[in-house]
Image: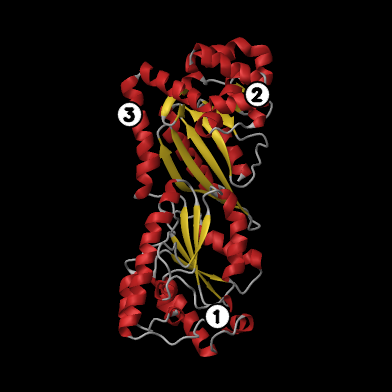
Amino acid sequence: MAAAFELFLARLQGDGVPHVVLRGVRNFPHHATGSDVDLMVRPQDARFVELVLDGIGRRMNCAVYARHRAGFLTQLYLHGRSEDGQHSFLTVDLHTSEACFGVPFLEADELLPGHTDETGLQVPTKWIGALVNFLGPWLSGGVIKTHYLETLAEVMGTEDADVRARCRRWFGLSRGDGIADAVYARDLKTLSQMNRSARRSLMWRALMHKPVRRSFAMLRFALATRVRPFWKPRGMTLAVIGTDGTGKSTLLEALHEVLDPAFRASENTTFKLRAAALPTLDQLLHFGKRTHTTEDFNRPHRAAPSGPIGSMLRAAWYALDARLGWWLKVTPRRRRHCLIVFDRYFDDFLVDPLRARIRPNAWTTRFFAKLVPRPDRVMVCTAPLEVVRARKQEISEAQTDQQLRGYERLAAERPEAFVVDTDCDLDVAVDRALSALFPLDPTSGSPSK
């Protein structure tokens, strides 16, 4: 990933594309997985820059697996795989203007051209770069990053007049001076208190300067971030299924360590079977009380299946719960680039219906399965029969063999599903899973949006 990104920036300089790197390059060319780099380019160059990144990625075992456009910002999510099987992730935030909730306040031409720093990168003039880097997270989320604050305060020792002039232009005379004074004094309390009023002032002054254009920019941003995710969600939903003993839990835990930093960690979550919105049938039939214990899960086929009507009602209830839970708990989270994992899914009822006391081969289960929302990817864990039996013996050998073959057939029928053989070292299984989740060939089932 580091070599690809370094080559990408060198290509932009070689082609004479005006650009500056705003944030995320303190350890250039190396980046921690899941980190992001902010790049400012002119609007007319943005499409060419994306094509350059795509082209270099194809040659360097990297791929843009997802894109998100919101006003003057395009977020490009990259995945790379090294020759030794190590996977890394990087986000390139491509700006054509600095904006606050979709309202632009600093055009690209005001930052371009920048100057070349000691690492050879094109960066903004020091004082404006320090100001923009501090204002970005502070205005958008009220986050005061101490590194950016210290840099800006130091710059004000020699460039105070330039910083104050720009703050007055964006925030007004008194509020601009107040922000500059608080920055110079490293006054975190005052800066936190001024955050909302500064944001309102900035947006109001920008709207008054060009009301029509910037009103449309705010509307476009709101549609991209608040409305569009409901039919074109961001991030990834992954269901992990398979018979007991195939190593689902171990593999899932290892995958979380790699994937959590690559997505918005605060929004990442794992659901057991479904994003439950309704009480379980056990609670519903026993007035909110549970009649089974944790030990009962070690005997998944402990109870006989219900009759035809009971099986239909059970499948319908679970399908309804899965649908409601998806609307209420999954969709709102996917306004942002997050990872949502299901440890088992409704698909398990197609292969192992006895676990839910549903009759085998019930047509109603297959019918309701079509009404349940589909995850982006379904990972089917499998292993040789003797390996599975050595790990778990909760069901008979014949049932285990039947389930293994059933899950493999299910994976073959669903285009979003893939099989991971866990009869190997954990690192190898993780590599297999990640290679299937983020194929470098864009035609092989990548979840790119």
Q: Check whether the beta carbons of the residues at disc 1 and disc 3 lie within 8 A of each other.
A: no
Residue annotated with mark 3 = 216
> 17 or 161, which is in the foreground?
161
> 4 or 284, which is in the foreground?
284
Of the residues tagged 1 and 3, which is closer to the observer? 1
Q: Which mark is residue 187?
A: 2
Residue at 31% from the left image edge and 79% from the top image edge: 363
N-term mark: 1 or 3: 3
- Crowding at mark 3 (Cα within 10 Å: few <14, some 14-19, many 20+): some
194 relative to 392, above or below = above
N-term mark: 1 or 2: 2
Q: Secondary structure at mark 2?
A: loop
Amino acid at circle 2: Asp
71 relative to 168, above or below = below
Amino acid at circle 3: Phe
Residue annotated with mark 1 = 296
- From where the camera sits, is residue 271 visible? yes
Of the residues tagged 3 and 2, which is closer to the observer? 2
